[in-house]
Amino acid sequence: MRVSRGPGGRLGIAGFRSTAAAAAPVLVADVGATSTRLALVAGDRVSFTILKQTVLTSRECPGLESALRDFLGDSSSRPGNAVLAVAGPVVGGRAELTNLGWVLEEGSLAAALGLRSVRLVNDLVAMASAVPWLQAGDLVTLQNGCPTSDGARAVIAPGTGLGQAFLIWDGVEYRAHDSEGGHADFAPVGELQDDLLDYLRSRYGHVSCERVCSGRALPELYEFLKARKTAVESEAIAGRLAAAQDRTPVIVEAGLASQPCPLSRATLELFAAILAAEAGNLALRILATGGVYLGGGLPRRLLPLLNRPDFLARFGQKGRLSPLLATIPLHVIVRSGVGLLGASRLALAEAGQGGPTRSGAGR
């Protein structure tokens, strides 16, 4: 895969300008609770090339260090540095992956892999780092709004968990910053969500946004609606769910079918309503006048439910600040692998092979 300058001289999704000739490749990773993507990337002045890549099932890996060692193997092109995007908070060069239980440290990884440096970044920071370079075909726009030049941008991505990040313009470029807002308290909207909060609080005590707005949340929402008798459960789907190790894909498929399971459909509708409200909350928290971007696999799959007036209405229902929400662009990222591309951009910039310059791309 080669990523290069687009039409009219615009830089591609992970494009960059370089001040040096092609050098040693860099190692990049996007480590999620479900999948781990690994790649070797080499850059030149105007583009970068993915030399080698693979996708692994995270829970089948004994650990990231061994996965990276196996991936590098006896390759003649040895990387000098690495940027590893991980699904968890990174503090002081150390990360505990919230939904995998892995503990990673930059220094020990660098020593074990024979690299000059390893940088750990939150996976949403990597995804956000790709946002300024996204092209029109990488997005579905739900609301055009009236974006402010150089305004802050928000990224929210429900996957296995609920990731959040934001970008701030520093006068030269957009810089991504991490957040653990997905673990903040869930704020219910309406009677149904009030009942959901009571249902989950009785089980867990603290109820976070991630608890109700992520892939792992869908079976919980399904069971809540089933107990509440909100919709009828299809017998066929009940049988599939009983046999499934991971019930989330079954619920999504059944809810999106041409003749959907009523309970699965109601589950997806509730999830979409919660996502819309939380995306609006994030827009307010950072005053995202540059736009809000919905990333991750679930928004791509659920696009038919998101690209509707009721989703926009829930996004914008913020009392006296509702008129402000109407001016904020809202997009769904439909290109896959954006986190890995963002990590590549960060790694190449750090290696001195492509520090970003001011560009109109994605602005």
Image (tube, rainbow, N blue to C red):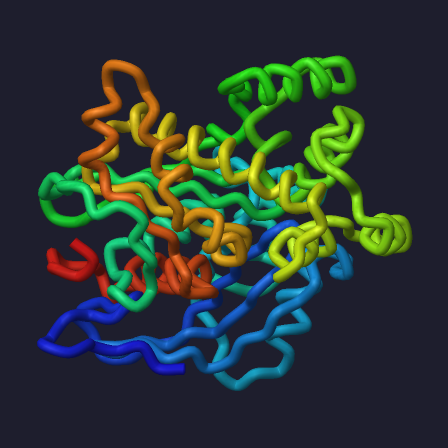
Residue in the picture at 30% in, 68% down? 137
Q: Quadrant of residue 202?
A: top right
Q: Quadrant of residue 109?
A: bottom right
Q: Indicate whether 161 appears above or below 53.
A: above
Q: Is residue 175 visible?
A: no
Residue nearest the observer in this picture, 220 or 118 = 220
Side of 26 relative to 75 (left or right): left
Residue nearest the observer in this picture, 87 or 278 = 278
Residue in the picture at 57% in, 83% down? 75
Q: Indicate whether 163 appears above or below 1.
A: above
Q: Is residue 111 visible?
A: yes
Q: Position of residue 69 (x, y in %)?
A: 65, 68
**Residue at the extreme bottom of the image, as rendered:** 76
Q: Position of residue 189 (x, y in %)?
A: 49, 19
Q: Indicate whether 212 appears above or below 330.
A: above
Side of 203 relative to 11 (left or right): right
For the N terminus, give its image quadrant: bottom left
Q: Position of residue 359 (x, y in %)?
A: 12, 60
